Amino acid sequence: MAGLIAGVMAYAICAPLKAQGALSAAWSRRDSTLAHSVAGCYELLRGGWESDSNLAKIEPAIPRDPVRFELTKKPARGWDVLSAAEQKTYFQVLVDSIAGWERDGGLFTTWVRVSDTEPAIVISRPLPMAGLALHVKLSGTDLVGTIVAFTDAVPDDGKSSASHAVTARRISCVQRRL
Protein backbone atom coordinates (compact mmCIF):
# COMPACT_ATOMS: atom_id res chain seq x y z
CA MET A 1 0.00 0.00 0.00
CA ALA A 2 2.82 2.41 0.86
CA GLY A 3 4.37 1.75 -2.58
CA LEU A 4 1.06 2.57 -4.29
CA ILE A 5 0.71 5.83 -2.35
CA ALA A 6 4.32 6.77 -3.13
CA GLY A 7 3.73 6.04 -6.83
CA VAL A 8 0.57 8.16 -6.93
CA MET A 9 2.33 11.01 -5.10
CA ALA A 10 5.29 10.84 -7.48
CA TYR A 11 2.91 11.03 -10.46
CA ALA A 12 0.98 13.90 -8.85
CA ILE A 13 4.23 15.85 -8.47
CA CYS A 14 5.90 14.90 -11.79
CA ALA A 15 2.89 15.29 -14.11
CA PRO A 16 2.40 19.02 -13.42
CA LEU A 17 6.15 19.61 -13.70
CA LYS A 18 6.24 17.90 -17.10
CA ALA A 19 3.23 19.92 -18.26
CA GLN A 20 4.85 23.08 -16.94
CA GLY A 21 8.02 22.23 -18.87
CA ALA A 22 6.06 21.94 -22.12
CA LEU A 23 4.29 25.21 -21.42
CA SER A 24 7.48 27.04 -20.52
CA ALA A 25 9.09 25.77 -23.75
CA ALA A 26 6.27 27.47 -25.71
CA TRP A 27 6.78 30.68 -23.71
CA SER A 28 10.52 30.46 -24.27
CA ARG A 29 10.00 30.35 -28.06
CA ARG A 30 7.82 33.48 -27.85
CA ASP A 31 10.38 35.23 -25.66
CA SER A 32 13.23 34.09 -27.89
CA THR A 33 11.52 35.55 -30.97
CA LEU A 34 10.97 38.86 -29.15
CA ALA A 35 14.57 38.86 -27.90
CA HIS A 36 15.84 38.61 -31.47
CA SER A 37 13.70 41.64 -32.38
CA VAL A 38 14.71 43.93 -29.53
CA ALA A 39 18.23 42.78 -28.62
CA GLY A 40 20.75 45.51 -29.23
CA CYS A 41 22.00 48.80 -27.84
CA TYR A 42 19.95 51.91 -27.14
CA GLU A 43 20.31 55.44 -25.83
CA LEU A 44 17.51 57.34 -24.10
CA LEU A 45 16.90 60.55 -26.01
CA ARG A 46 16.65 63.82 -24.12
CA GLY A 47 13.06 64.96 -23.98
CA GLY A 48 12.28 66.52 -20.64
CA TRP A 49 12.12 63.29 -18.64
CA GLU A 50 15.56 63.95 -17.12
CA SER A 51 14.33 67.23 -15.56
CA ASP A 52 10.71 66.23 -14.84
CA SER A 53 9.96 67.44 -11.29
CA ASN A 54 7.28 64.77 -10.78
CA LEU A 55 9.80 62.01 -11.52
CA ALA A 56 12.46 63.71 -9.37
CA LYS A 57 10.06 63.94 -6.41
CA ILE A 58 9.89 60.13 -6.35
CA GLU A 59 13.37 59.27 -7.64
CA PRO A 60 15.78 62.12 -6.90
CA ALA A 61 18.77 60.32 -8.52
CA ILE A 62 17.47 60.62 -12.11
CA PRO A 63 20.51 60.24 -14.37
CA ARG A 64 21.74 63.43 -16.02
CA ASP A 65 24.38 61.66 -18.11
CA PRO A 66 23.39 59.88 -21.32
CA VAL A 67 21.70 56.58 -20.52
CA ARG A 68 22.95 53.83 -22.81
CA PHE A 69 22.04 50.21 -22.36
CA GLU A 70 22.12 46.88 -24.14
CA LEU A 71 19.21 44.46 -24.20
CA THR A 72 20.73 41.00 -24.45
CA LYS A 73 19.34 37.64 -25.50
CA LYS A 74 20.86 36.01 -22.41
CA PRO A 75 18.50 34.98 -19.60
CA ALA A 76 19.23 37.00 -16.46
CA ARG A 77 20.99 35.01 -13.76
CA GLY A 78 19.02 34.43 -10.59
CA TRP A 79 15.60 34.92 -12.18
CA ASP A 80 14.92 31.31 -13.20
CA VAL A 81 12.25 30.74 -10.54
CA LEU A 82 10.38 33.97 -11.30
CA SER A 83 10.69 33.32 -15.04
CA ALA A 84 9.13 29.88 -14.57
CA ALA A 85 6.40 31.19 -12.25
CA GLU A 86 5.43 34.02 -14.63
CA GLN A 87 6.01 31.86 -17.72
CA LYS A 88 8.24 34.56 -19.16
CA THR A 89 11.98 34.89 -19.55
CA TYR A 90 13.79 37.66 -17.71
CA PHE A 91 16.71 38.72 -19.91
CA GLN A 92 19.92 40.50 -18.89
CA VAL A 93 20.46 44.23 -19.48
CA LEU A 94 23.94 45.76 -19.58
CA VAL A 95 24.18 49.46 -18.70
CA ASP A 96 27.07 51.86 -19.01
CA SER A 97 28.33 53.39 -15.79
CA ILE A 98 25.90 56.10 -14.67
CA ALA A 99 26.83 58.30 -11.71
CA GLY A 100 24.65 57.50 -8.71
CA TRP A 101 23.44 54.16 -10.07
CA GLU A 102 26.44 51.94 -9.35
CA ARG A 103 24.58 50.50 -6.36
CA ASP A 104 22.61 47.29 -6.72
CA GLY A 105 24.04 46.46 -10.13
CA GLY A 106 23.02 49.56 -12.04
CA LEU A 107 20.02 51.46 -13.31
CA PHE A 108 18.53 48.51 -15.22
CA THR A 109 19.39 44.83 -14.84
CA THR A 110 16.65 42.93 -16.68
CA TRP A 111 14.02 43.20 -19.36
CA VAL A 112 10.88 41.09 -19.72
CA ARG A 113 7.93 40.74 -22.09
CA VAL A 114 4.71 42.17 -20.63
CA SER A 115 2.28 41.57 -23.46
CA ASP A 116 1.36 38.57 -25.58
CA THR A 117 -0.50 40.61 -28.19
CA GLU A 118 2.18 43.16 -29.07
CA PRO A 119 5.89 43.43 -28.41
CA ALA A 120 5.77 45.42 -25.15
CA ILE A 121 8.55 45.09 -22.58
CA VAL A 122 9.61 46.46 -19.19
CA ILE A 123 13.25 47.30 -18.63
CA SER A 124 14.02 47.61 -14.92
CA ARG A 125 15.83 46.40 -11.88
CA PRO A 126 13.14 43.96 -10.68
CA LEU A 127 11.48 44.10 -7.31
CA PRO A 128 13.19 47.11 -5.77
CA MET A 129 11.26 49.24 -3.34
CA ALA A 130 11.85 52.30 -5.50
CA GLY A 131 13.50 53.17 -8.77
CA LEU A 132 12.97 53.70 -12.48
CA ALA A 133 11.55 51.42 -15.16
CA LEU A 134 11.02 51.76 -18.89
CA HIS A 135 7.66 50.55 -20.26
CA VAL A 136 8.25 50.47 -24.01
CA LYS A 137 7.20 49.01 -27.35
CA LEU A 138 9.26 48.45 -30.45
CA SER A 139 8.62 51.21 -33.02
CA GLY A 140 10.70 50.61 -36.12
CA THR A 141 14.16 50.10 -34.66
CA ASP A 142 13.57 52.30 -31.59
CA LEU A 143 11.78 51.73 -28.28
CA VAL A 144 8.96 54.17 -27.46
CA GLY A 145 6.93 54.43 -24.26
CA THR A 146 7.32 55.85 -20.76
CA ILE A 147 9.88 56.06 -18.02
CA VAL A 148 8.28 55.47 -14.63
CA ALA A 149 9.62 56.48 -11.22
CA PHE A 150 8.04 54.47 -8.41
CA THR A 151 8.23 53.90 -4.67
CA ASP A 152 6.40 51.80 -2.12
CA ALA A 153 6.90 54.53 0.49
CA VAL A 154 3.92 56.70 -0.44
CA PRO A 155 4.79 60.41 -0.15
CA ASP A 156 2.56 62.94 1.61
CA ASP A 157 0.87 63.89 -1.67
CA GLY A 158 -0.22 60.24 -2.14
CA LYS A 159 1.50 59.81 -5.50
CA SER A 160 3.77 56.76 -5.47
CA SER A 161 4.61 56.88 -9.18
CA ALA A 162 5.14 59.35 -11.99
CA SER A 163 5.83 58.85 -15.67
CA HIS A 164 7.10 60.74 -18.70
CA ALA A 165 7.19 59.90 -22.41
CA VAL A 166 10.52 58.57 -23.60
CA THR A 167 12.24 57.25 -26.73
CA ALA A 168 15.27 54.98 -26.76
CA ARG A 169 17.04 55.17 -30.12
CA ARG A 170 18.87 52.07 -31.32
CA ILE A 171 22.60 52.73 -31.55
CA SER A 172 25.67 50.73 -32.45
CA CYS A 173 26.84 48.61 -29.53
CA VAL A 174 30.31 50.13 -30.05
CA GLN A 175 28.76 53.54 -29.18
CA ARG A 176 27.29 52.11 -25.98
CA ARG A 177 30.70 51.58 -24.41
CA LEU A 178 31.98 54.84 -22.98
Image (spheres, helix red, strand yellow):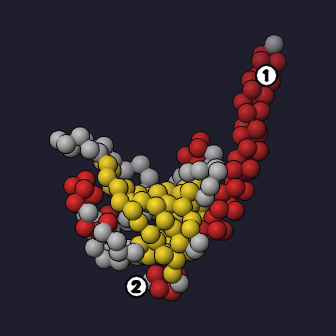
Disc 1 marks which amino acid?
Val
Q: Residues within 10 Å of mark 1 (few under 14, many from 20)?
A: few
Disc 2 marks which amino acid?
Leu
Q: CA distance from mark 1 to mark 2?
A: 59 Å
State left or right for residue 1 relative to residue 158. right
Query: x, y (%) of residue 47?
Result: 34, 71
* Position above or below: 41 against 13: below
Query: x, y (%) of residue 41?
Result: 52, 76
State left or right for residue 127 relative to residue 55. right
Residue at 40% across, 75% down: 45
State left or right for residue 153 relative to residue 132. left
- Along the line of sight, which residue is nearer the eye, 10 or 174? 174
Q: Earlier in the sequence, mark 1 or mark 2?
A: 1
Query: x, y (%) of residue 6?
Result: 76, 22
Disc number lying in front (1 or 2): 2
Question: Which residue is at the far left?
Answer: 156
Quadrant for the C terminus, please: bottom left
Q: Which residue is mark 1?
A: 8
Q: Secondary structure at mark 2?
A: loop
Residue at 44% across, 76% down: 43
* Position above or below: 76 against 5: below
Residue at 70% across, 55% down: 30
The reply to whether residue 1 is in sight is yes
Residue at 58% across, 74% down: 141
Quadrant for the N terminus, please: top right
| Quarter assignment of residue 132 | bottom left
Which disc number belongs to residue 178?
2
| Quarter assignment of residue 46 | bottom left
- Along the line of sight, which residue is nearer the eye, 106 or 151? 151
Say if mark 1 contacts mark 2, CB within 8 Å: no
